[in-house]
Amino acid sequence: MSAPSVTADTAFRVAERVRAEAPWDVFAERSRRYEVHLQGRTVEMVRGPIELEGYALRVFRSRDGQTGTGSQSSTDLTDAGIATSLRQAETLSRFSRFPTKKVDLPRPGASLSPVEVRDPRLWDRPNEEILDYVHALLTAFEGRKGVGPSFGSVRATLSEATVANSEGLRASYAHTTVDFEVAVKSEGGPEGAPPGEYWVNDVTRRLEPRELPRRVEEWCQFAHDVRRAAPTPTGELPVVLPPDVMGQILPAVLGFRCTGEAQLRRIAPDLGTRWAPESVTIHDDGRVPWGTASSPVDDEGTPQRRRDLIVAGEVRSYLYDALHAGAFETESTGSALRGMVFGIYRDWRRFLHPPSSTSSTLEVAPGSGGSDAEIIEATGDGLWVQQLGWAVPDPISGAFGGELRIGYRIRNGKRAEPVRGGTVGGVVAAPPGTPSMLSSIAAIGSNPVLTEWVLAPTVLVRPLTVAGA
Amino acid sequence: MSDLRDHESELAGALRRLEPHTSFADVLTESAEGEGCRLDSKSVSPAREPTLRGAVLRAWGGGRWVEAATSGLDAASLRAAADSVLAGLTKAGSGAPLAGEPSTVRKDWTESPAHPLRDVPLEELIALEKDVLSRATAVDGIKECQVSILWADDERFYLNTAGARCYQVTSRVRATTVPIAIENGRVEFDYLSEGGVGGRERLAFLSSDRIEGVARDSAKLLHAGAPPTGEMSVLLDPGTTGTFAHESFGHGTEADQFVRNRSYLLPILGTMVGPETLTIADEGPYPGAWGMVQCDDEGNPGRRTVLVERGRFLGGLHDRETAAALHASVTGNARRADFLSRLFVRMTNTYVEPGDWSLEELVREVKQGVLMEHSTSGIEDPQGGQMQLKVKKGRKIENGRLTDTVTSMALSGKVLDFLKGIRGLSRRSDFEMTPGYCGKGHTDLLPVASGGTYLLSTAIVGPA
């Protein structure tokens, strides 16, 4: 499988030089990064190309009835450099122990269809496209009084990923990733309130300048609302979580607790455990178009696919990479991803990190809750969480909580005044009988939206703990 | 370890290529490597950090910076990177000269630890980890334990067109123990983690008492209740006090936020913001601290910068440009996460100076409140002046006594209100400097440390 634009053969070149017994694999990327940084409405810095080509070479060796895994990453593509990496990987494998007797690496021949993860315009004209995007961003702020960007950045990474292994697999694909950040500041005005800010952080696969006028309008409104926000109420309240916020909370916990890694450490829920009401179904899908973790194959070369995680409220399956699949005598689910940090951020230098089994895009199945307005109406009185400072879910205990940067009271089924401050939190998932965010889902909207790590509709949780000012 | 100074002629050649076309250019080259092992009851996972080497070239384009980076240190790769910068300079056009004074410092910082961890055989580190694992899992309720030990050497070599030439090597060591308690589907943990610049001596904290202690604390959390919520007295442990310093007067005083007009602190520069007992500083060369910076990535030596002195807000952390814009001095805080990342004004080791209370006296001050222990994260709000601190656990304080253990919680509120509410800080004997990673926004993570002693104030507490 090879997209026409892929010219890199990094992993294949390394593989040709590997003189070692099977099994082994190589993951490599050749990346170019381009950045534009703004200070106010002025371009402060233009960076690029930031060029990086490197690989991770992994060997698997039988040791004492288990497997010793040795991995070495490097940017040295010379014969001597590859030989050194292989020697170091072999050395590490002597100390490593993992409880599987057999590691099945993916074989060639799987029928793969492309996944939309490459922005072709960005790929062909990175500098121009980014500068055009920045121009569109600044244009969208023009004519607005008392509100504008205080700083921002657009960082685009254009990568060619290649995977090779001792089974003869040779896979490659090209992908683009855009890290976008802007701080929208509202100030001045007759009311004399202190300035307010709405801070936007997005990771996407493509630049979509046509979306900017609508989004800037929303961001400016949020920045204005920060200035007039009332203190957050306290109590056990019905709380509405839009897709952006769900994306901060769900992946870190579900993407760990429902994996072979958690199963091995005895902290995964038993299959069949009821974590949520019957209305809740969550799939993990590595092929969602433009998903930030989507790709034709995972970082071990196994085809990505759609996986059941929670079906009708019950935990249905776990996610596996090759190593953990071996430990449980099952097959990899194509869930080996490199570079995940805190479960919510992915390092663009993926070859520097070992793969781990984790979720790609969590798809929360749409419910019958209707539009956001209908979810709000169903809430009655409660709280709409627009943005948390940082939810920082704890993958092990499942606890999460973050400061409310901006939210809205819901009164009599209508969105009312903005509120800010205090914290909103709880436990994402808990054993049956213990209240949790998942078990307290009372309504699910009908319109899923793709954000960084989830494809989810707006959800009503009744209740969550809110500690207000 | 190879020496980046061996590439000086190629690096200088790249700068010479840029020099006719710019008023200022510099190059930072970096080589990083390390090794570590993560171990639990099921697996042993040794890992060598990648040997990541490369250089970033930067030139002033008369109004904006132009940068390019390469992972090759040969003449051809550096020439290609220089050509990319030249192409960017052409597009940038001419403009104002770069404000501020360039570094002309020429110095090497090459002190290495007496007992580098790189010299310790991997099997010896694994044996130590297995010993930690067995001690932790011997405690009732502990079903699993993750242990990790790592070292990382970072070598940086900086040259600029003004003649600066700075070389430094930093050797970091860190170890972490996470005993995991499981009962009836509930999973809890506490942690023990220390790290800093140095060698084998950095692992001395892995004593039986401390390992068994943290394991017992993990098990206790299985039966801990939820924290109280609402506004109350909060007593921060030393590590959490350090995170408070980092999130409040660390990020808030990074002077690029001043220049962006994005700091709520700028209008109150020079005013009293807290009690006279409060002094906050950032110190790059703090001996042995995880965030040690002898020389920043613009060639300026690190130093101690007092941000708040006896309650008065004195100033911020600077790079060359912000110092020029705000008529201040450079403070040695211009840092890149690595050669692939842009330079920002960043913290190093940020801490609150100790006070003169004992912990017992601080607890006695509290009628209803909570002791917040083991910081897990924090986030700043430079424009809005709020902060969020999260901790792994705590104790209720009732009528001047520490009572029940409670699970993880978050503190939030306005920094200035929190400062005004400070009632006391404990003595130097409680002082701790804690290692961590800091992002500029959500990216560009780099090592920093934060420190302090017990601190008593008032804030909103909620679940986390």
Image (cartoon, coloured by chain):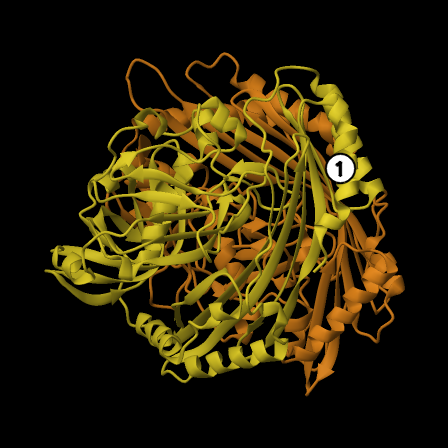
Chain colours: A orange, B yellow
**Which image quarter is the C terminus of chain A in?**
top left
Could you tell me which secondary element the residue under label 1 belongs to?
Answer: helix
Quick one: A114 or B339, which is closer to the camera? B339
Left or right side of B406 for A92: right
Q: Residue at x 68, y 30 (%)?
A: B161
Q: Residue at x 61, y 64 (%)?
A: A357
Q: x, y (%) of residue B313?
A: 31, 33
Residue B186: name its quadrant: bottom left
Left or right side of B3 for A142: left
Q: Residues within 10 Å of mark 1 (few under 14, many from 20)?
A: some
Please say whether residue A92 is visible from this viewpoint.
Answer: yes
Farthest residue in the front direction?
A: B106
Q: x, y (%) of residue A339?
A: 62, 55
Farthest residue in the bottom direction?
A: A64
Quick one: B101 or A300, which is closer to the camera? B101
Quick one: A121 or B329, which is closer to the camera? B329
